[in-house]
Amino acid sequence: MHAPNNPPEIDLRAEFTRFMMSYKFAIDEVMTKINILREEFNHVHDYNPIEHVNSRLKSPESILEKAQRKSLEIDTAVIRENIHDIAGIRITCSFLSDIYKIRDMLARQVDLTVITERDYVAAPKANGYTSLHLIVSIPVFMSDRVEQVPVEIQIRTIAMDFWASLEHKIYYKYNREVPVTLLDELKDAAATANRLDLKMQNLHTQVRQLNASADAGPAGNEGTVPFGDLERLIVPKALLDSLAEQSPRPAPTEASDA
Ligand code: GTP
Ligand code: MG
C-alpha cells in the first residue's frame, strides 16, 4: 500500500520488513511448539529426545542471491512461493528413532502442514550427508492479516550434526573444491557416524527395557517435588484413594444398582 507522501523506496522497505517479520514470527511459533514437545516428551517418555535447537533467519543479501541464482522475479509473493528456507530451524536429537518421533509429533498438529519431506536418513546424499528435512507451513496472525509462512526444519542426531558441521567447514575452506582424498575420508566418517547412531540406538533400547522392569518402586526425597521435574512426581496411594472418594462418580445405572 502506498502512503501518499512517502517516496516508493520507503514503502518498499516497510513492505520488505513486514515480509521478514512474518518469517521471524513463524520461527517463534514453531520454536514454542518444539519446546512444548520437548517438555511433554520428557514427561511421558522419561528422557529428553531433543539435545538442542537452533534457528536462523536468512539475510536479505542471501535471499537476493538465491532468488537471482534461481532466476526468480524479485517480488515478495514470488520469493515466498519459491524460497522455503528463509526461516530455518535445526533440531538435534539423541537417537535415530527420535528423528521420526519428532517429525510425527509436529506433523500431527492441525495448524502445521508438512509441504515437503526429504529423508536423507533413509537415502543419504552421495557425499554421506544425512538428516530429515521438512518444509512446513504455519499461519502467522498479524494485526491486519494472516500469512501462511514456510519454515525449513532439519532434524538430525548428534553424530549427523557433528559430521555436517565439519563437512560444511571443509567445503567452504576449500572454496567448494574439496580434494578427492578428503571427500573419500568424509564419506568414510559418515559411515562411522551412522554405525555409532545404530549402536547408540541399540543401547538405548536395551536400557529402556531394563528401566521398565526396575520401575516397580521409586525411592526418593520425600517432602519435596524437584522443580521442573514433575515426571518424577510420586503420588501416595492414600492421596489417590481420597481423591477417588471426593470426586463425583457417575450416577449408577439401574442395572448396577441392584
Ligand atoms: P538449498 O538451495 O541449499 O536450500 O538446497 P535444496 O533446496 O536443494 O535443499 P537441500 O535439502 O538439499 O538442502 C537444504 C539444506 O540442508 C542446506 O542449506 C544445508 O543446511 C543442508 N545440507 C544439504 N546438503 C548438505 C551437505 O551435503 N552438507 C551439509 N553440511 N549440509 C547440507
Ligand atoms: Mg538452503
Image (cartoon, rainbow, N blue to C red):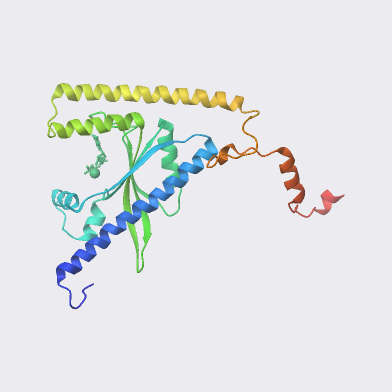
| Residue 120 sits in quarter | top left
Q: Is residue 247 above or below residue 204?
A: below
Q: Left or right: where does residue 131 sit relative to residue 112?
A: left
Residue 143 can be seen in this image: yes
Q: Is residue 68 above or below residue 167?
A: below
Outermost residue, right direction? 258
Q: Position of residue 2 (x, y in %)?
A: 21, 74
Identify the residue shown where x is 31% and y is 21%: 192
Identify the residue shown where x is 18% and y is 25%: 183
Identify the residue shown where x is 12% and y is 34%: 175
Q: Is residue 118 above or below residue 149?
A: above
Outermost residue, bottom direction? 4
Residue 125 can be seen in this image: no
| Residue 178 sits in quarter | top left
Count of numbered tags: 0
Identify the residue shown where x is 75% and y is 45%: 242
Q: Left or right: where does residue 58 sit relative to residue 34?
A: left
Q: Position of residue 240 (x, y in %)?
A: 71, 43
Q: Position of residue 148 (x, y in %)?
A: 34, 58
Q: Which quarter of the figure is the N terminus placed in?
A: bottom left
Q: Position of residue 216 (x, y in %)?
A: 65, 28
Q: Nearer the viewer, residue 141 or 125?
A: 141
Q: Is residue 150 above or below residue 174?
A: below
Q: In what quadrant does ligand 1 lie?
A: top left
